[in-house]
Image: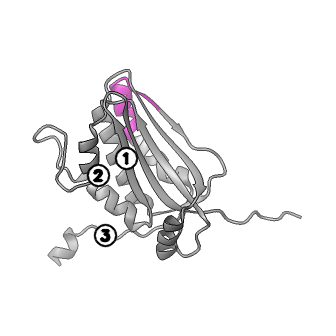
Amino acid sequence: DLLSSTRPRQPQPSWSPVEQVISPAALLMEPAFLAKEISFTVEIPANLPFVWADVEKMHQVLVNVLANALAATSSQGTIKISAEAREALPDELERGRRVAGAVSPLVVMILVQDTGCGMPESDAQKAFEPFFTTKAVGKGTGLGLFLSRETVVAHGGNLSLVSEIGRGTTVTITLPGFQPPPKHTE
């Protein structure tokens, strides 16, 4: 009983609108960005495919990624969340089919871009290792990105980042997509 109560629950994804995945985390974090005088924008195009997501689990991932962006970005900087769809690569399609079944040949990418301090390539390569952190002692466990990637992979997706010192970081969450067939109206 003790072990099962301390283990995080497995994701229980369903097909959800992208806005339902992004908006709760954006609303939660927005006051912190405003308090630090960081420009914060959310761009979610209409007509995106649904994403295969456990909304609660993806909320945790996005809050973690946004908190990292907040910590790395100084006042007057910018943080942007955007979403887009593209054709799935063969390995992405295979991962999606393993967990979701009725996938379209699409993935949805959620991008979090910041104009923060960025990190050197050597740190970017280690960013997903457990207990690796660039934060001061007592300010981070080094588990946030590791657990976030594990969560996204359990959804049949991927989490990656690109960073450049002095220019910022872009974290990309890629999830299986599903475009329902158009409804015929008579």
> Residue 55 at x, y = what percent?
45, 59
Residue 38 is covered by the magenta coloring: yes
Query: In 3D space, how far apart are the residues under numbered discs 3 and 1 (Cα atoms)?
Result: 25 Å
Q: Residue at x 28, y 45 (%)?
A: 124
Q: Which residues are magenta?
A: 29-40
> Residue 131 at x, y = what percent?
16, 53
- Image check: 183 left or right of 83? right
**Contact, CB < 8 Å: mark 1 with mark 2?**
yes
- Mark 3 against mark 1, which lies toward the viewer? 1
Which quarter of the figure is the N terminus placed in? Answer: bottom left
- Mark 1 against mark 2, which lies toward the viewer? 1
Looking at this view, name the residue that lies furthest to the top.
76
Looking at this view, name the residue that lies furthest to the bottom.
1
Query: In 3D space, how far apart are the residues under numbered discs 1 and 2 (Cα atoms)?
Result: 10 Å
Query: Type of residue at label 3?
Result: Arg
Residue for badge 2:
145
User: Counting residues from the N terminus, which is met first, the one under dot 3 or under dot 1?
Assistant: 3
Query: Type of residue at label 1?
Result: Leu
Q: To which quarter of the image does residue 137 belong?
A: top left
Element on which disc 1 rests: strand
> Residue 105 at x, y = what percent?
61, 65
Query: Type of residue at label 2?
Result: Leu
Q: Residue at x 49, y 67 (%)?
A: 91
> Residue 183 at x, y = what percent?
77, 64
Q: Residue at x 59, y 52 (%)?
A: 85
Element on which disc 3 rests: loop
Looking at this view, name the residue that lies furthest to the left.
137
Query: In 3D space, how far apart are the residues under numbered discs 2 and 3 (Cα atoms)?
Result: 18 Å
Q: Residue at x 33, y 58 (%)?
A: 149
Residue 9 is labelled as 3
Residue 161 is labelled as 1
